[in-house]
Amino acid sequence: VEVKKQKMKLKKISNYFLGLGVEFLASLFLRIKGYQIICRRFRSHNGEIDLIALDGLTIVFIEVKYRSQKESALESLSQTQQRRIFRASQDFFIMCAHMRNRTYRYDFLVFSQFYFQHFRNAWQIDEFVT
């Protein structure tokens, strides 16, 4: 039982550092494209946003996902996660009131072993506002 717990703990730590590495690669890619990264791993009581960047004057809230298979990477962003990111983005605007009047969007960066794709404007907020 102890060996199993230790293996699970090591896997969790390994996944954490893999996630950091993928987010670093994503931020490099975005910087090359001209984005300015303004925040990494923004956390609020409502959720976490992997990267927040400026694309010109537009604020971009970015979710980064890595999966070993392309198909599972593309399917890895659930509506529940989108809602959490949306709520966390609203908290960001509360904390950074000077940015409230800017346009914003939600992007999704997908990585797998041999695949990478950037989905601009991956989902709309009106899906969650009722």
Image (cartoon, rainbow, N blue to C red):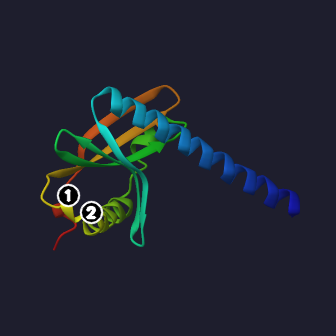
Q: Residues within 10 Å of mark 2 (few under 14, many from 20)?
A: few
The picture quadrant where one finds residue 29 is top left
Q: Is residue 60 left or right of residue 42?
A: left
Residue 115, given in percent of the width and then of the height, sits at: 44, 28
Q: Measured from the top left, where is residue 58 in percent x and y?
A: 18, 46
User: Residue at the spot x=74%, y=56% of the render?
Assistant: 9
- The amino acid type found where label 1 is placed reads Met
Residue in the image at 70% along x and 50% along y: 11
Q: Which residue is more in the foreground, 58 or 68?
A: 58
Is residue 56 or residue 106 the one in the foreground?
56
Quadrant into which the C terminus falls: bottom left
Q: Are marks 1 and 2 in contact (CB under 8 Å)?
A: yes
Q: Position of residue 48 (x, y in %)?
A: 42, 60
Gap between marks 1 and 2, in whole Å?
A: 6 Å
Residue 70 visible (yes or no)? no
Instruction: Name the quarter where the N terminus is drawn.
Output: bottom right
Which of the labelled discs sits on residue 96, or is there none?
2
The residue at the point 32 percent across, 35 percent down is 118
Measured along the vertical axis of the image, is residue 84 above or below residue 25? below
Amino acid type at circle 2 is Cys
SS assignment at label 2? loop
Horizontal arrangement in the rendering, residue 29 relative to residue 20 (left or right): left
Give residue 42's mark.
none
Q: Circle 1 sits on which residue? A: 99
